[in-house]
Image (tube, rainbow, N blue to C red):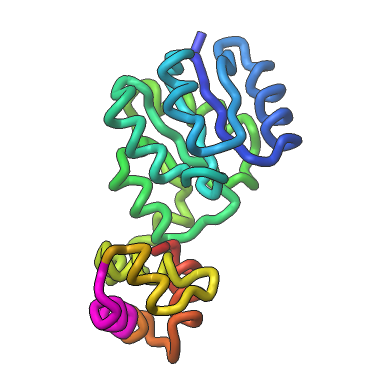
């Protein structure tokens, strides 16, 4: 049996996925979590062979959790399953060590087949998304520019962002100005929107 951990914040979707995967003769869902910050602990306790992770989770994103799993549970293969097929997300997932990236609108048979493939050491990527990622190019934002934009999300002031990131206000302004330039937008809220649409944040 292939031991699977399922991380999905929508309870109905999580239950449906667990039920559908449980109907496969060789797949057993050994853990289900609704938060990103519960993934590593559940994996350490249940020792899944494949972790099926959503990206947008409360507590910690699936992309960050994928990187954590690579460190803490290196024998667990990660398959990202998301509603948001954004090129930047695919790149970040691969950088975090994910073995696969699928969007949720595919048939469950494809998902089960993908779980088997990643367990065999193969990489599985939604073909349309792979093409989009290649044409989109790499993320132009530096880690610090992403941090500054990410801290801006809730309308925080420059002083708030500086305090959060332990930087001077002038440094924060420089990072935000650079991010606005790289995203081709007029202000930081537009830059946040553009970066999110590309999956860079």
Residue 122: tell me if it is visible.
yes
Residue 24 x, y percent position in the rendering: 63, 16
User: Quick check: 107 above or below 131?
Assistant: above
User: Quick check: 45 above or below 123?
Assistant: above
Q: What range is drawn magenta here?
A: 167-177
**The quarter of the displayed image where residue 22 is located:** top right
Residue 56 x, y percent position in the rendering: 54, 49
User: Quick check: 53 above or below 198?
Assistant: above
Q: How many marks?
A: 0
Q: Is residue 168 magenta?
A: yes
| Secondary structure predominantly adopted by residues drawn in magenta | helix
Using residue 183 as the reference point, say whether residue 26 is left or right of it: right
Residue placed furthest toward the right = 12
Residue drawn at (29%, 24%) of the image = 74
Residue drawn at (44%, 87%) of the image = 187
Q: Is residue 47 magenta?
A: no
Residue 137 x, y percent position in the rendering: 30, 67
Residue 182: tell me if it is visible.
no
């Amino acid at each position: 049996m292939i031991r699977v951990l399922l991380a999905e914040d929508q309870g109905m979707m999580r239950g449906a996925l667990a039920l559908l995967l449980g109907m496969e003769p060789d797949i057993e869902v050994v853990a289900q979590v609704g938060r990103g910050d519960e993934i590593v602990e559940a994996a350490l306790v249940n020792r899944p062979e494949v972790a099926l992770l959503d990206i947008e989770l409360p507590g910690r994103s699936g992309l960050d959790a994928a990187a954590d799993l690579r460190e803490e549970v290196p024998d667990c293969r990660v398959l990202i399953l998301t509603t948001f097929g954004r090129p930047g997300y695919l790149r970040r997932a691969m950088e975090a060590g994910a073995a696969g990236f699928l969007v949720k609108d595919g048939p469950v048979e494809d998902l089960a087949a993908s779980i088997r493939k990643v367990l065999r050491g193969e990489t599985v990527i939604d073909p349309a998304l792979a093409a989009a990622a290649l044409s989109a190019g790499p993320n132009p934002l530096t880690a610090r520019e992403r941090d500054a934009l990410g801290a801006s999300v809730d309308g925080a002031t420059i002083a708030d962002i500086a305090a959060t990131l332990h930087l001077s206000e002038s440094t924060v302004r420089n990072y935000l100005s650079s991010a606005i330039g790289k995203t081709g937008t007029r202000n930081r809220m537009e830059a946040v929107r553009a970066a999110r649409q590309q999956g860079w944040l």
